[in-house]
Image: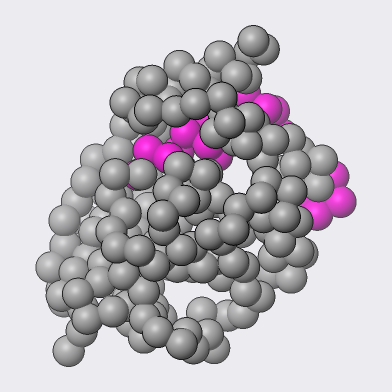
Amino acid sequence: MNSEEKLLRDGLNALNIPTDDDKVTKLLAFIALIEKWNKAYNLTAIRRRDEMVNLHLLDSVAILTYLEGKRMIDVGTGAGLPSIPLSIFRSDIEFQLLDSNAKKTRFVQQAILELKLPNVKITHSRVEDFEPEQPFDTVLTRAFASLPEIIDLTRHLISENGVLLCMKGQTPEEELAAVNAKTTLISINVPHIEAERCLVKITHLKN
């Protein structure tokens, strides 16, 4: 077992996430793909594999238990984070990934093919231009803007009883105060990462 695999398995164990060899293999293959494509596509500023395990894989799957429903959209997915790691554990959820960067969506499409993830689709589009055939149970984002802005941009994607999950670093007190909806602040502890992490769950969005 190499050092990245040990780091990953230890982290998954700390998060109480049951796993198997196939999932571990896919997760490590994913960061190997990122590393390979990074040279030409500049997918991430993180270059070391051990940091990718912590900041890409474990940081993503730390929110696994908060996904709701059977249809989820990841807005501004970039290199497929957090949804590709999440999809490896939740084959029962249909993941729609969305990003406006064509290079990144090409990479994600290749990752979906190579990792054999039938429950994942990628679309190259700006969020405000994307019109789904039906709304989603969960809208997920690594918060790319303020919470009120994210709500405005994604409201049309959320089903009547759906949830918006925004991954943040430090607690965004001022942004939370500006949100006119029910918010739940969830502290996220990611193994091997000392920086503060939180997940903001927003419900009752439909007027």
Q: Image quadrant of residue 110?
A: bottom right
Residue in view at x 51 percent, y 68 percent: 96
45 falls in the magenta region = yes
Residue in view at x 66 percent, y 50 percent: 116
Q: Is residue 203 above or below residue 60?
A: below
- Judging depth in this view, the residue of 114 and 82 nearest the camera is 114
The residue at the far right in this view is 40
Please provide percent x and percent y for residue 79.
64, 54
Q: Is residue 62 left or right of residue 101?
A: left
Please provide percent x and percent y for residue 34.
72, 43
Q: Quadrant of the N terminus?
A: top right
Please provide percent x and percent y for residue 28.
64, 31
Residue in view at x 38 percent, y 28 percent: 18
Q: Is residue 169 above or below residue 68?
A: above
Find the magenta span and give its range.
39-63
Label the magenta part by its dominant secondary structure. helix
The reply to whether residue 74 is visible in this rendering is no
- Judging depth in this view, the residue of 175 and 181 nearest the camera is 181
